[in-house]
Amino acid sequence: MNNDARFIILSHNPRTMSGKPCCDVIGCDESGLIVSRLSPEGYLVATGKKAYSFREAYRQFRYCKKCHDYLMSRVWNRVNSSDDKTGDHVAPTAI
């Protein structure tokens, strides 16, 4: 699962044969039991609607445990990296 190209946002809400939502990571056929506001790329994605709360302002994604754990480790590594975090870069706390 080290291929970051698999982390692409799906435009629909697929379901497993049992009716449970699928994981939003392309190529993963597991049930998406974990709901997160982080996109597969590790960022918040605005809904584009006028919102009065955090819940309404950002899109939800679903992940299986394996993909969620991988996503969180990537986000944590990005936040803790010594890369340039000045200028136009998104603040680590924004995620």
Image (cartoon, grey):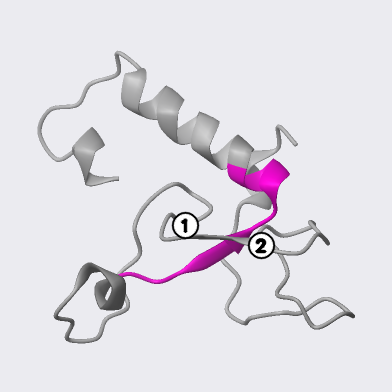
Q: Give how far apart the Cα atoms at labels 2 and 1 are.
A: 15 Å
Mark closest to the chain's N terminus, 2 or 1: 2
**Pointer 1 local density, CA inside 10 Å: few below 14, some 14–19, many at least 20:** many
Q: Is 63 situated left or right of 87 in this image?
A: right
- The answer to if 11 sits in the magenta stretch is no
Horizontal side of residue 24 vs 38, given as left or right: right
Mark 2 secondary-structure assignment? loop
Measuring from the top left, give residue 6's x and y in whole percent. 68, 50
In the image, is residue 22 above or below residue 6?
below
Q: Which mark is residue 69?
A: none
Q: Is residue 68 visible?
A: yes
State the mark number for residue 39.
1
Quarter of the figure with residue 51: bottom left
Q: From what the image shows, is residue 25 above or below residue 88?
A: below
Magenta residues span 58-68
Q: Which residue is mark 2?
A: 33
Residue 43 screen position, x and y as percent: 37, 51
> Residue at point 53% right, 30% down?
73
Name the residue at 33% across, 27% down: 79
Residue 21: horizontal and vertical position, in percent?
70, 75
Mark 1 element type: loop
Crowd around label 2: few <14 · some 14–19 · many ≥20 (10 Å): some
Q: Amino acid at mark 1?
A: Ser
Check if residue 61 falls in the magenta segment: yes
Question: What residue occupies the far right of the structure in this picture?
Answer: 17
From the image, state whether disc 2 or disc 1 is nearer to you: 2
Residue drawn at point x = 42 percent, y = 28 percent = 76
Q: Tell which of 78 and 73 is nearer to you.
A: 73
Q: To which quarter of the image does residue 19 belong? A: bottom right
Please state, as top left, top right, bottom left or bottom right, where the N terminus lies in the image: top right
Q: Amino acid at mark 2?
A: Leu
Is 33 located above or below residue 14 in the figure?
Answer: above
